[in-house]
Structure formats: C-alpha cells, structure tokens
Amino acid sequence: VQLQASGGGLVQAGGSLRLSCAASGRAFRTYTMGWFRQAPGKEREFVGAIWRSGVSTTYADSVKGRFTISSDNAKNTLYLQMNSLKPEDTAVYYCAASTAVILSNIRHHSGYAYWGQGTLVTVSS
C-alpha cells in the first residue's frame, strides 16, 4: 500500500487542522491505520490509530479529547481532525499502515510497515 499525507500548515494555538492520508494499492480497510508525529530532535511518537474495522480507535494521552481519527473506505482515505491545537503539537505528521492488531504493537512505530511521506504542522503561540 502507498500512502500520501496532506493537509499540514501553519495555525495559531487553539485552531484546527484536518490531515488526510490517501492510500493506493491494497485497500486500507485490511490494515490498522495510524498517525505518528516527530518534532525536531525528538523520537517519532504515536498519535492515534484506527483498527481495520474502521470503528475502534486508540489515542495517545497527549491528544485524547482533541484529535479524532476517522476513515472513508470508499475513498481509501484516513483523516486526523486536530482541534484545540497547542504549540507542542508542532511536528511532522506521518500516516502509516500496519497488519498488527495487538494494542502494544499498534501504539509503536515498529509495528508499522508502510509509511507516508509526512506533512508539517506548525502551531504558533
């Protein structure tokens, strides 16, 4: 599966952005789909994921209640709606696809075999 992330940009603190991840190739409903982010000088960290069912989701504590993952199987597209953005949310955001189903694997970048190219989100204070 090939992944293409988009939708990043510059936003003020408190604002919102929606990231998209278009998938081509094998239908992404066969994968668990995740979002990760990496800030300068920091390791890539888990943001959230949606199981192949398209219903169950899991989020990092730092974004829970502010970010929402959804998917549109007809469009083969994954979304990350980000609200109440904070300067510490500034990072390059990546979408990824995994065949894992176990939570511990889904919440770590090593559980993902396929990655998009990343899209930069900058939140100004």
Image (cartoon, rainbow, N blue to C red):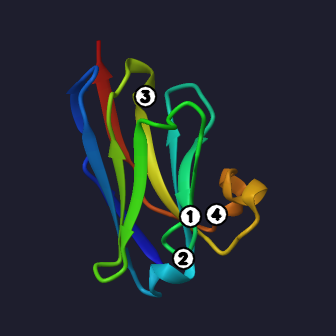
Among the 4 quarters of the image, the one containing residue 92: top left
Tell me which residue sits at (71%, 70%) in the image. Answer: 101
Which quadrant is the C terminus positioned in? top left
Q: Is residue 34 left or right of residue 16?
A: right
Separation (CA) of disc 2 from disc 1: 7 Å
Nearer to us of marks 4 and 3 is 3
What type is the residue that disc 1 sits on?
Ser
Residue receiving disc 2: 53
Q: Look at the numbered disc 2 and give the secondary structure of its residue.
A: loop
Q: Earlier in the sequence, mark 4 or mark 2?
A: 2
Separation (CA) of disc 4 from disc 3: 22 Å
Separation (CA) of disc 4 from disc 2: 17 Å
What type is the residue that disc 3 sits on?
Asp
What type is the residue that disc 4 sits on?
Tyr
Q: Earlier in the sequence, mark 4 or mark 1?
A: 1
Residue lying at the far bottom in this picture: please name it.
26
Q: Position of residue 40 (x, y in %)?
A: 50, 27
Q: Earlier in the sequence, mark 1 or mark 3?
A: 1
Nearer to us of marks 1 and 3 is 1
Relative to the observer, which residue lies in front, 22 or 104?
A: 104
Residues marked 1 and 3 touching at CB (< 8 Å): no
Disc number placed over residue 56 in the picture, else none: 1
Disc number placed over residue 112 in the picture, else none: 4
What type is the residue that disc 2 sits on?
Ser
Q: Look at the numbered disc 1 and give the secondary structure of its residue.
A: loop
Separation (CA) of disc 2 from disc 3: 27 Å
Could one spot residue 8 in this view of the protein? no
Q: Earlier in the sequence, mark 4 or mark 3?
A: 3
Disc number placed over residue 89 in the picture, else none: 3
